[in-house]
Amino acid sequence: MRYIRLSSVAAAAAAILTCVAVGPAAAGDDASTPVSCNTAALTAAIVGADPGETLSLARNCTYHLTAPFSTGEGLPPISQELSIRGNGSTIVRDGNATALFRIFHVLNGGNLRLQDLTVRGGNASVTTTNGNGAGILVDSGGTLKLSGVDVIDNTATLDGGGVAVAAGGTAVVRRSWVGFNNALDGGGLYNAGTLIVEGSEFGRNHAQRYGGGIDQDGGNATIHATVISRNTATVRGGGLANFGGTTNISESKIANNTTGLRGGGIVNTANLTLEKSEVSGNVAAAPGGDGGGIYNSTTSGVLLLKGSKVIRNSANGQNVPGNPSQAGGIFNDSGSVTLDHSYVRNNASTAAPGGLRTNNGATLIDSTITHNIPTNCVPNPIPGCTD
């Protein structure tokens, strides 16, 4: 299964270089409104759209936003139901633009549907706006639906380089690619509302603090058949930071992410379930860094693995006095960990244990912790785990 639409990223890059529109999209039988390959035409179409209208962009066009529509906003904010069919086009904050602004903003009551489109280059700064959601910001009461959309190269001063969803907001991401975005928290996506992700990829995003790929900070998230890969976070949660609400991940892969201190793949202080999923190749790299695969902490951190595997992760930072770098697989600090028909294998850390380190035990149901170095669980013995 392919999760990343590399061809669409390449097409977007080519369109930016050439600025050539292949031609207008056919309206077809759906009564959509064609929008010519012109930024002014796009802005006018959004302003004049009727509730429920569908705009059909010129095929493979690049719409350059050289100036904001209003302070901090690249396009008119969306306050009603609107669909935009991209037809392979790109909407980009032009590299020569001097003002800082995001691309899309969905207000309370707005319902924005984007399809077959690239959203690129937004920059949300606290000096011009609230600093969240450089590519797309969804307010409380707003709804965003992405289908076959690339959200790339966006930068937010605060949360959600690619997408930010406020408490009470909703985002549905299907068959999309969120990559190369930057933020303080949630390099790719920040969510405090309701999030549904299917068949997508979050890759090569960066957070200065938490959640390189995704920062889940409240509400609920359901993530299925998705890859979270090659993201970085300076402090915690290279791939995913789960700090609030309930997150369910199924048939997905969290791989090759990197953080400094805690949770190369995942950091969890809330309710997290991984089912038929893989956490692999992640790294906690800083001195004293712990939990290469997963770092689970506080009494509110409830971690459940069902039919899942934590493999080939590492906590390889240098030991510091009183703070050894432990648990290439899973580090549990006062939280709850249950492994149900799962295994922790071939993980490594600078100091023992390399597999699972916990200060209050763990529950193993037909699960194994084996072949980790320097030990599996010792010096914190766990029933069912031997060295």
Image (cartoon, rainbow, N blue to C red):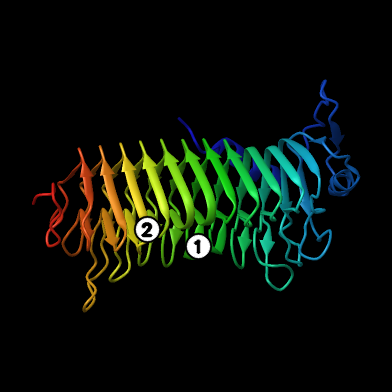
Q: Furthest residue to the left?
A: 387
Q: Which amino acid type is marked by label 1? A: Ala
- Residue at 13%, 50% (x, y): give it: 383
Above or below: residue 158 compared with residue 200: below
Image quarter for residue 101? bottom right
Q: Is residue 227 visible?
A: yes
**Residue nearer the viewer, 338 or 275:** 338
Q: Which residue is mark 2?
A: 301
Q: Position of residue 143 (x, y in %)?
A: 69, 46
- Which quarter of the rendered picture does the N terminus lie within? top left
Name the front one of labels 2 and 1: 2
Q: Which amino acid type is marked by label 2? A: Gly
Q: Is residue 19 visible?
A: no
Q: Position of residue 58 (x, y in %)?
A: 80, 35
Q: Furthest residue to the top?
A: 29
What distance separates the C-alpha of mark 2 from that of mark 1?
22 Å
Secondary structure under badge 1? strand
**Residue nearer the viewer, 237 or 307:** 307
Q: Position of residue 94 (x, y in %)?
A: 74, 56
Asked whether, in this view, residue 303 is left or right of residue 2, the answer is left
Could you say which disc has been placed on residue 167 in the image? none
Q: Position of residue 254 (x, y in %)?
A: 39, 46
Image quarter for residue 260? bottom left
Could you say which disc has been placed on residue 207 in the image? 1
Secondary structure under badge 2? loop
- Residue at 81%, 45% (x, y): give it: 80
- Residue at 21%, 57% (x, y): give it: 361
Asked whether, in this view, residue 100 is left or right of residue 172, the answer is right
Q: Furthest residue to the bottom?
A: 321
